[in-house]
Image: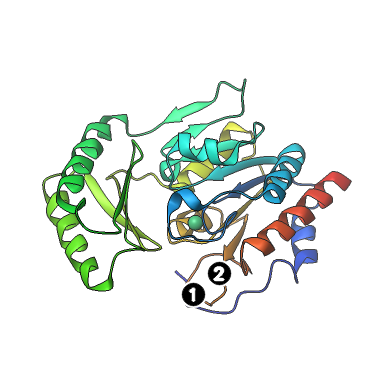
């Protein structure tokens, strides 16, 4: 991963992006939390604004657009509610095409019982800690600790280690104030991007992937498109990343989507 550096703004350098997209077919990939919505204390409070939903309709009409999130697929589809989009939930393990497309790919079904088992054990061992939010997302699970007092986080960390020791088919990854547990499979958001580009026939030299995301799990996607795509990190501080542009926050993501929609509508 690259050293932290101040990446060029995707808005200030939009003309460069415009040049990269000239006469290309575009696949647009967007993370949800912290990208389309601001980061909030509780996952259920991360609601898409009316403006952002309208923008997703607009970009969805002019280029193939997918939302890729650590959230469970049903939760993600329910929060976004834009029919023409592609969705990849649970970090790309659960992929769904637009209504009528017949596209549905699920990876790691054999791991679902282990996820359910680990979830039950974590509920029993961590449920009493104030502020812990546990989510079973079928192909992965989340332990949110944003609302947990700092001095209790190491207890959660240790409990998770202990539970995972009896589930060798699962592994832990890290997000913003959340521990994620997912199958020990070489599958992630970057593989989901490659899969969706392939499904859409966007794997030739005339295709470009744009990926916009804010979290550690989005780095897999930035790396997967590094050779020919455009990775855009959403962050207000420099941090190590494989992205090549940045946007400060979800407001800037909205401006960026509006420009992409206008650019591709004009083509
Ligand atoms: Mg995110």
Label 1 near label 2: C-beta < 8 Å? yes
Q: Position of residue 89 (x, y in %)?
A: 46, 40
Asked if 79 appears above or below 262 in the picture, the reply is above
Q: Give the structural element (helix, strand or loop) at label 2.
A: loop
In the drawing, does residue 71 fall left or right of residue 80? left
Secondary structure at numbered mark 1:
loop
Pick the quarter of the image with the N terminus.
bottom left
Q: Which residue is mark 2?
A: 235
The answer to whether the beta carbon of the residue marked 2 is less than 8 Å from any atom of ligand 1 is: no
Residue 267 can be seen, yes or no: no
Rendered residue at 61%/23% (across/down): 101
189 lies above or below 214 = above
Residue 243 position, x and y percent, is 56, 64
Q: In the image, residue 120 lies at what x, y percent?
A: 19, 40
Residue assigned mark 1: 239
Q: Is residue 199 left or right of residue 208?
A: left
């Amino acid at each position: 991963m690259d050293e932290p550096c101040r990446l060029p703004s995707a808005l200030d350098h939009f003309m460069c992006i415009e040049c990269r997209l000239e006469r290309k077919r575009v696949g647009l990939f967007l993370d949800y939390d912290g990208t389309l919505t601001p980061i909030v204390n509780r996952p259920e409070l991360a609601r898409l604004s009316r403006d952002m939903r309208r923008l997703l309709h607009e970009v969805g009409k002019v280029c193939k657009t997918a939302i890729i999130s650590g959230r469970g697929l049903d939760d993600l589809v329910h929060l976004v509610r834009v029919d023409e989009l592609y969705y990849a939930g649970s970090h790309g393990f659960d992929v769904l095409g637009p209504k009528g497309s017949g596209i549905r790919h699920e990876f790691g079904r054999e791991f679902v019982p282990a996820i359910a088992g680990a979830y039950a054990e974590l509920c029993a061992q961590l449920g009493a800690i104030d502020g812990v939010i546990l989510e079973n997302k079928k192909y992965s699970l989340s332990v949110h600790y944003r609302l947990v007092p700092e001095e209790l986080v190491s207890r959660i960390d240790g409990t998770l280690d202990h539970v995972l020791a009896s589930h060798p088919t699962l592994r832990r990854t890290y997000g913003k104030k959340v521990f994620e547990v997912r199958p020990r499979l070489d599958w992630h958001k970057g593989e989901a991007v490659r899969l969706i580009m392939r499904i859409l026939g966007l794997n030739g030299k005339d295709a470009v992937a744009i990926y916009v995301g804010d979290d550690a799990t989005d780095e897999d996607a930035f790396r997967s498109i590094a050779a020919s795509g455009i990775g855009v990190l959403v962050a207000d501080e420099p941090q190590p990343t494989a992205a090549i542009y940045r946007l400060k926050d979800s407001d800037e993501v909205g401006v960026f989507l509006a420009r992409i929609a206008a650019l591709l509508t004009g083509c």
